[in-house]
Amino acid sequence: MRLIDGKAIAAQISAATAGEVAALAADGITPRLAVVVPTRDEATAWYVRSIERATKRMGIDCQVEELWDATADQISARLAGLSADPGVHAIICQTPLPPGTSLHEVARQIAPAKDVDGASPASLGLLAAGLPVFAPATAEAVTEILRHEQVPLEGRNVVVVGRSTVVGKPAALLLLAQNATVTICHSRTRDLAAVCAGADILVAAVGRAHLIGASYVAPGAIVIDVGTNPTADGGLAGDVDADAVAGIAGALTPVPGGVGPVTTALLLRHVAQAAAPRQGPA
């Protein structure tokens, strides 16, 4: 089994984005990303710090808005204000949100042209219609990895395990747009292992550590592991049991080092695209 190097793919994406940012700087434009943080969650704080470091290296301004203990109305109002601010090119809203607040409720205030992580229901609708929009970066990372690995999608059987609006559903839409035959599985799917075993390409995005074992994978299948499940020792485990599928799968994205770096690189590419006059989402 071959391990797919997500860091190498991310480096290629980042190099291209750096060129785009330099071209914008020559025109007097510095991309600005606003990150709204309505939570004190430490894992979220760690991720935001990593975004700040990545944007700084890329020459992108990062404006962190800490709205700890804010209400849904306050978060929505701030997102609406940032959407109306011409000095802000891109917006993301971090989770988890306060109890009783849904991401869709507040993210609908983000203008699709600035919604670089595809969180708004409007963005998901545009994606479903096949219109230009920023897809959620994690979902796009799935198709970007397959493109870099030169894996043909047309006519291939792809199974996506997970139906979230952050990964599962948008990833399925992106795969459909490339003429793959897509099956979406979830907690109510009967005989999940048998369905997965029929896939040429298997995308695991369910959020359950090591759920995908040997019986779920067809010989030679390409397996994209989107899972990032915390472990007792402070590490991360994927949704796929890598040891169990090692002698079966043709290729696998490792956790960490697979989908994660590509997701971050794509998010920064989206920010550069959002800042570019007359460009925006592809």
Image (cartoon, rainbow, N blue to C red):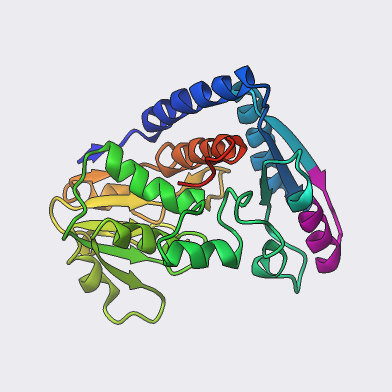
Please indicate whether residue 52 sits to the left or right of residue 165 in the image: right
Q: Quadrant of the N terminus?
A: top left
Place of residue 25 in the rendered image (x, y in percent of width and height, measured from the top left): 63, 20
Residue extending farthest to the front is: 278
Which residue appears at 50% of the width and 54% of the height?
A: 133
Q: Nearer the viewer, residue 3 or 279?
A: 279
- The magenta segment is 65-81
Give the image quarter of residue 104: bottom right
| Vertical order, 50 against 27 (above or below) | below
Q: Quadrant of residue 145?
A: top left
| Image side of residue 65 versus residue 201, left or right | right
Q: Residue at x 36, y 63 (%)?
A: 172
Q: Residue furthest left?
A: 219
Q: How many marks?
A: 0
Where is residue 127 drawn, in percent x and y? 46, 61
Q: Is residue 77 highlighted in magenta?
A: yes
- Residue 128: within the magenta? no
Q: Is residue 9 left or right of residue 182?
A: right
State the residue in front, 42 or 151: 151
The image shows residue 102 at horizontal and vertical percentages of 69, 70
Q: Looking at this view, is 257 or 131 the one in front? A: 131
- Vertical placement of 46 versus 203: above or below? above
Q: Measuring 23% from the left and 43% from the top, which residue is drawn there?
A: 251
Residue 211 seen in the current view: no
Q: Is residue 162 visible?
A: yes
Q: Position of residue 152 (x, y in %)?
A: 18, 48
Nearer-the-camera pick, 54 or 120: 120
